[in-house]
Image (spheres, grey):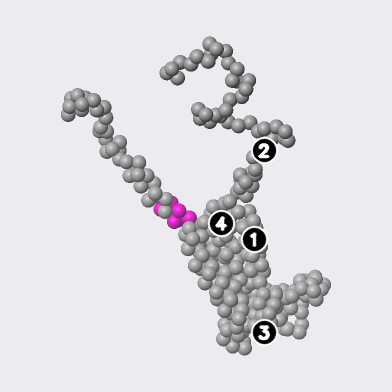
Amino acid sequence: MRDLQAAAGTPVAAVPSTPEAQATPEAQAAPDAQAAPEVRAPAGRRRGIVLACVAAFVLAADAITKAIVVSHLREDEPVHLIGNVLELWLTRNSGAAFSVGTGQTAVFTLIAIGVIVAIVRTARRLYSLGWAVALGLLLGGAAGNLADRIFRAPGLFRGDVVDWIGVTPRYYPIFNLADSAIVCGGILIVILAMRGYHLDGTRTDHRTEDSASEPAPQAPDGEQAPQAADGPGAELDPEQAKLDPEQAKLDPEQ
């Protein structure tokens, strides 16, 4: 067979002798593509566990502190810890966080349920530790206040939220641990977004994008920017065009 190919003028190609050498580039890249999900899936489960642990801690701490406050404090008798700066003051709130929207209990109940469902669905594609903590704070805070709306008086999905932390209560609304977790989670989300962190664990470098978008430097007025000579038809500098006659004789093979 080699003699026939050589006689016809066809170059003889070496035939790989091993299966690894015979494999095409697509076939060699296939195992790497299949191995990528196997490496990334455990990281996603770990981030989901972090989110669940943070949410469970916030929910438990909020429920325990509310139970203690309800059993030991009276609504008309605040406890002054640091004068009028820090007080323990039991109040009932039918609105949102920090006593906002009083009287719209049913509306905020539906909003809390929607937030919880959205966070749980987002956890499926969560690979960032920072986002896991932030969403865990939001989930625990929303669940803590939702539990009050479901189980406390005056009725199902219309219950009042227990607030008890007063920081200069004359000028600032009274709140609870669930409200604090929601605010901290929101602040952390803003920081992560500003620094370019995404849910999937990747990060966008804004400095690289800014440098890539900068225009190319321009030559001063009255001067032409240097241009690269590409192709046989590119213009030459007048000084370079003045060549010695002997140097202008190029080799035909070049």
Between marks 1 and 3, how big is the CA–CA gap? 29 Å
Which mark's residue is nearer the viewer, 2 or 1?
2
Question: Dot 3 surroundings within 10 Å: few (below 14), some, or many (20 or more)?
Answer: some
Reading the chain from its start, which is encountered first: label 1 or label 4? 1
**Mark 3: which amino acid?**
Gly
Question: Dot 4 surroundings within 10 Å: few (below 14), some, or many (20 or more)?
Answer: some
Q: State the residue position of label 4.
A: 198
* Image coords of residue 158 (percent x, y): 60, 85
Considering the numbered disc 2 on the image, is that residue within a helix, a strand or a loop?
Answer: loop
- Give the residue at the far top of this rendering: 246
Between marks 2 and 1, how big is the CA–CA gap? 35 Å
Q: Quadrant of residue 79?
A: bottom right
Residue at 33% x, 44% y: name it.
Answer: 27
Determine whether 6 is above or below 183 in the image.
Answer: above
Which mark's residue is nearer the viewer, 2 or 4?
2
Residue at 65% x, 74% y: name it.
Answer: 65
Determine whether 39 is above or below 23 in the image.
Answer: below
Horizontal side of residue 97 vs 139, given as left or right:
right
Residue at 64% x, 56% y: name it.
Answer: 194
Q: State the residue position of label 2.
A: 217
**Mark 4: which amino acid?**
His
Range of the magenta residues? 38-43
> Residue 190 has which mark?
1
**Mark 1: which amino acid?**
Val
Q: Is residue 39 magenta?
A: yes
- Give the residue at the far right of this rendering: 83
Q: Main secondary structure of the magenta part?
A: helix
Question: Dot 2 surroundings within 10 Å: few (below 14), some, or many (20 or more)?
Answer: few
Q: Quadrant of residue 28?
A: top left
* Image coords of residue 181 (percent x, y): 64, 68
